[in-house]
Amino acid sequence: MMTKSKMDTYLRSIQLRRDIVPSFDDYPFHLTAVRSLEKMDLHPKVTYIVGENGMGKSTLMEAIAVALGFNPEGGTINFSFSTASTHSNLYEYLRLVRGISKPKDGFFFRAESYYNLATDIDQMDQEPRGGPSIISSYGGKSLHKLSHGESFFATFLHRFGGRGLYILDEPEAALSPYRQMAMLARMNDLIKDNSQFIIATHSPILMAYPDALIYNLTSDGIQQTTLEETDHYILMKHFLNNKDKMLRELFMDDDEGK
């Protein structure tokens, strides 16, 4: 099997075309993820984008996906459903540097609109068409008939086929810690089959892939970091190691506010 290398990275970097941005005071350019973006190199295996809510992670992920030809609400490049045209025009201001190799598969997963994706699959399968049903690529059972977590994991397990570029926005939203670890194993299988991931997440478990880049979005800009340096890891570790003390401090603050 071919070893993953710089030469067969599907997406090498993204760059904001700052010279044509109309104003950094307006949406979406005022968001930290956009305002601070110049050039972001991507790892051939996994690149993580992390940070607190409001930094613009989802907006940036959406723009990367749309610039690559994916539907703003998720799915493959063949999905065209739209429940609301709320995506920004940031994708028009991104320069994507692609690798020599082209992916054979791809998927934009976003937790917030996954219900709409599942609905669209069911609707398309009700239309007369030749060949196998679409849902057969997702495990053969309507995603609406599975629990939220099972539905998410069915997509990762059955639909992701390898040699692909996968953009995932908060995939941990419905996954238990056990399922998150299972997802790491699934990612590793796909990476061995020459896949590349770009993931926005809050989960220290999902951030733990050993050969990856992590970009942390803060009010001070975009900084490359390590798992152990992220607030997500530090806070979770501190809470688990000092649960009683942390709870006393949290509840004390609540009592003082009454």
Image (spheres, grey):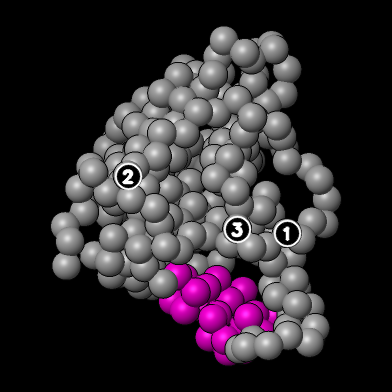
> Does residue 57 appear anywhere in the picture?
yes
Would you say 64 lies left or right of 214 here? Answer: right
- Which quadrant of the rendered structure holds the C terminus? top right
Q: Which residue is mark 1?
A: 80
Disc 3/disc 1 C-alpha distance (Å)? 8 Å
In the image shown, does 114 or 138 lie closer to the viewer? 138
In the image, which disc is placed on residue 131?
A: none
Q: Which residues are magenta?
A: 134-160
Q: Amino acid at mark 2?
A: Ile
Q: Is residue 148 magenta?
A: yes
Please give left or right for residue 83 compared with residue 221 in the image: right
The residue nearer to you, when weighing 189 against 106, is: 106
> How many numbered callouts?
3
Q: Main secondary structure of the magenta part?
A: helix
Locate residue 100, reporting x and y percent: 32, 44
CA separation in Å, label 1 and label 2 = 27 Å
